[in-house]
Amino acid sequence: MESMYQKLKLLIGEEIKEQEPLASYTTLKIGGPADFFFDAKTTEQLVTAVKGAHSLGIPLFLLGSGTNILIGDKGIRGLVIKNSTSVIRMRGMKGRMSGGSTHGFIYVEADSGVFFNKLVRFTIEEGLAGIEMHLGLPGSVGGAVYMNSKWTHPEGYVGDVVYQAEILSSKDERKVVPRSYFQFAYDTSVIQKTRDIVMRVTFAFVADNKEHLWQVANESIAYRRQSQPQGVKSAGCTFRNISKAQALTLATPEYTTSAGFLVDHAGLKGETIGDAQISPIHANFIINNGHATASDVIQLIERARERVKHQFGIELKEEIIRVGEF
């Protein structure tokens, strides 16, 4: 009887791997093996791999740049597809030219596997405003759309500048959808529920002075470096901030909405379990100080959640996404 591995090789390609360790593909550097693993470098390879998994009825997980996720110590069952698509394209403009200036929108399309920082730098160099405040944002274009990634100095959401996207639905239908399809909200888009796969995203930007854009970007990344741990193995923010309504209702200290502030004031900054540690720089980050396991991280998450619940009456929700078997 032909093995699943052989079937996948026939449908997707010889590059399919078995029992591939996943820790090195994540920013937290934690995670067991994938049953099967494929690195898709083009959109067509990505579509072929997804359809191949669906046709064989095996579980599928799409891995971007490995931020914001915690992979279980036992790994991921089924096929893991690493999204390494990497093309950025200028798609034209809508508006008018007058006095040597552009008035209207300039459209840029990026593959979902593009590192978001690469896109930010591209747009700044082209004199396009809209995502310059996101310089330093880890992750891929697809992940940023999936999470509607945000920044607060100055405030901006990735979803604010999405114009449309090409997606592959759970029924393997390729279609182009407008921004409204995503129902963007805080840390949320509809594809977290629909499980559509984003293949390409078109963004709408406006023209601006390149030097001004670099100034905003550099001020933003300076604040990021000052306020967040740098040069460490981390998945990013562990918990979502609470709403302003919750902060007012529960009378949090200084009516803060910051999850990191609450974890800190619950006395957990610097707390460790195994090689996992709540960052002494910013309490909403858990870092891997060497050989931390997913189990270590989960125990820290639950300790922080319980302590904050006990002290402030707030049930923190995870921003980090758990994937695989623990």
Image: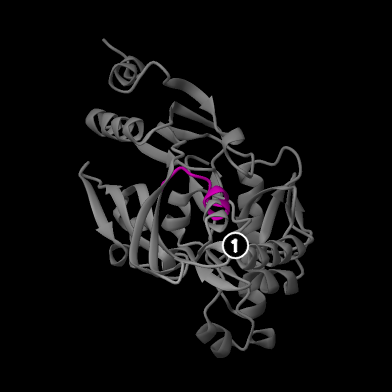
Classify 217 as above or below 17: below
Disc 1 residue type (three-letter): Lys
Task: Find residue 259 and report its horizontal and vertical position in percent.
Answer: 62, 71
Q: Is residue 119 magenta?
A: yes
Q: Is residue 314 magenta?
A: no
Of residues 243 and 167, which is closer to you in this image?
167
Q: Which residues are magenta?
A: 110-121
Q: Residue at x 58, y 41 (%)?
A: 26
Task: Find residue 130 and report its horizontal and vertical position in percent.
Answer: 50, 66
Q: Which residue is mark 1?
A: 210
Q: Residue at x 35, y 55 (%)?
A: 92
Horizontal relation, residue 82 to residue 283: left or right: left
Q: Residue at x 72, y 72 (%)?
A: 266
Q: Residue at x 76, y 53 (%)?
A: 272
Q: Secondary structure at mark 1?
A: helix
Horizontal relation, residue 68 to residue 195: left or right: right
Quadrant of the rendered image containing residue 60: top left
Q: Residue furthest top?
A: 1
